Amino acid sequence: MRIVTGTISHETNVLSTIRTDIEQFERRLLLRGEEVFDHFGGTKTPVGGLMDSCANHGFELVPTVFASATPSGKITKEAFDALLGEVLDGIREAEPFDGVALHLHGAGVSEGHDDIEGHILSEVRKLVGERPVVSTFDFHANHTTLMVESVDVLIGYDTYPHVDGYERGLEAIDVMERLLDGSLRPTKAFRQPPMMPALQAQFTGRYPMKALMERAFEMEEIGGVETVTVAAGFPWSDFEDVGLSIIVTTNDDQGLADRCADELSGLAWGLRRDFLVKPMPVREALEKVKAAEEGPIVLADIGDNPGGGAPCDGTVVLKAVIEAGLEGGVFAVMADPGVVEQAASAGVGNEVILDLGGKIDALHGAPLIVTGDVRLLSDGRFINKGPMGTGAETDMGRTAVLRIGGVDVIVTEKRLQPTDLELYRSLGVEPTEKRFIVVKSSVHYRAAHEPIAKEVIELDTPGLTSPRLAGFGFKKIRRPIFPLDLEMLGITELKSMEEE
Ligand SMILES: [Zn+2]
């Protein structure tokens, strides 16, 4: 059997001031043909899973394009049309083939399409006719009726932090085999309870998301249930279908799919009050660090998460740390290509006067004028040791470690979340020896950092990925929806909830 694969992956934050043109894809990852397999072969990633599973089943996997950009603003019309055109051309050129297995994100918005995945899948469907189409999806997908109706089976990640992309890739090809041999006749139920949890509330390692996922896993053991997807959604895509959704796929049993989906949807809705997030004021958190006898304490700058489209150059926490005179910490990471260039020109061991961060927008703190010692310069490349994306290379762009006051600040050319401890170790920084670690991340940092952290604190920082969703002025999201319309729940304001 010949299976064609392709990826256009972007989590679009429509409030970001960074336009997502083709250069943004080139910066992160844009691979064609065999390059895709050269990059992902042997990695614990979704495409690595598709590759291994095809090998196990004796299928031939045919690559088209793999395009992924760091979360940012809307994808330009030119970039989206070009990438989709490449995927569709690749599928045409792969004839004769038996099925298509894609890896998509699910929260992409382009200048022409609020639901890019629905558009991609419906265009793919036109090409392949009755042949099976399956796709894996990110946990942050905002699923739509068009997406669900255009695929045979849709398989979402079960985890946030996302540590099961590889397993979902394997599963996609197992499902493909059953579609091809006719033993699976998929019947699907799709539900969208009126809720859009903030990112921090979507952490699958703690209640209430954990409770919802555990029930979904139980359902997957029921005879006739093929796969259950719970996707927590991404509010900043700001279109009608944003939010939490549930897709239950059964084998030729629509009633069973409907009953399972209704139960999960009701369970999610019943838990809604527990999806509110209560971060700690920065000053209070720094007092805790001062008082702590042991480190590292991990401080999450949840408002400036580049993985959700924020700039990654916010200065609020660094400024507070300097003012508090706290020493022994490390910041991961501050994206500021100009400062990297300045550090590289000055050279290791030299002092530089910096205009650091705060450059992309005005939401994340003003630039900091500080002096720093250049401690180390690097090409910013390392191989992930996991548990996320194990074996894949991370490329931060050129990177400098600067000692500012009593802390090490990792300054990179590219925007990225710290999801792997090799980020520090590849730069000669041992994270377990630090008193505190500041990460610009909502949840993904937890996979690698929780095992070494004495405590994890979510900081109440301003920014594009803050859990204070009511302040963003979203325009297209269907209403009413939790937590924007608290009055529909008999709650008058968020503040009163937080004080409970
Ligand atoms: Zn995600």
Image (spheres, rainbow, N blue to C red):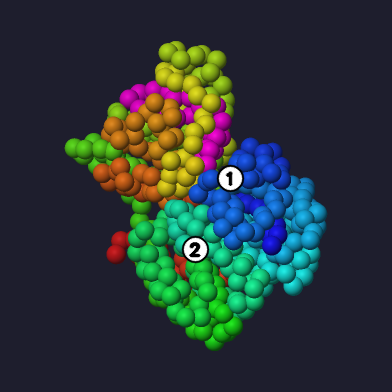
Q: Decide which of tag 2 and tag 1 comes sooner along the chain.
A: 1
Indicate the amino acid at tag 2. Ala
Extreme-front residue of the structure: 58
Location of residue 232 in the rendering, given as x and y in whole percent from the top left corner: 49, 63
The C terminus, quarter of image: bottom left
Asked whether the beta carbons under mark 2 and mark 1 sit within 8 Å of each other, the answer is no
Location of residue 35 in the rendering, given as x and y in whole percent from the top left corner: 67, 41
Question: Which residue is nearer to you in this view: 253 or 173?
Answer: 173
Region of the chain picked out in magenta, as a range: 392-417
For residue 40, the mark is 1
Measured along the vertical axis of the image, is residue 445 above or below residue 339?
below
Give yes or no for residue 448 being in the magenta stretch: no
Indicate the amino acid at tag 1. Phe
Measured along the vertical axis of the image, is residue 261 above or below residue 35?
below
State the residue position of label 2.
232
Q: Residues within 10 Å of mark 1 (few under 14, many from 20)?
A: many
- Compared across the picture, whether 442 is left or right of 90 comes to left
Picture residue at 65% right of the left edge, 45% below the top = 36
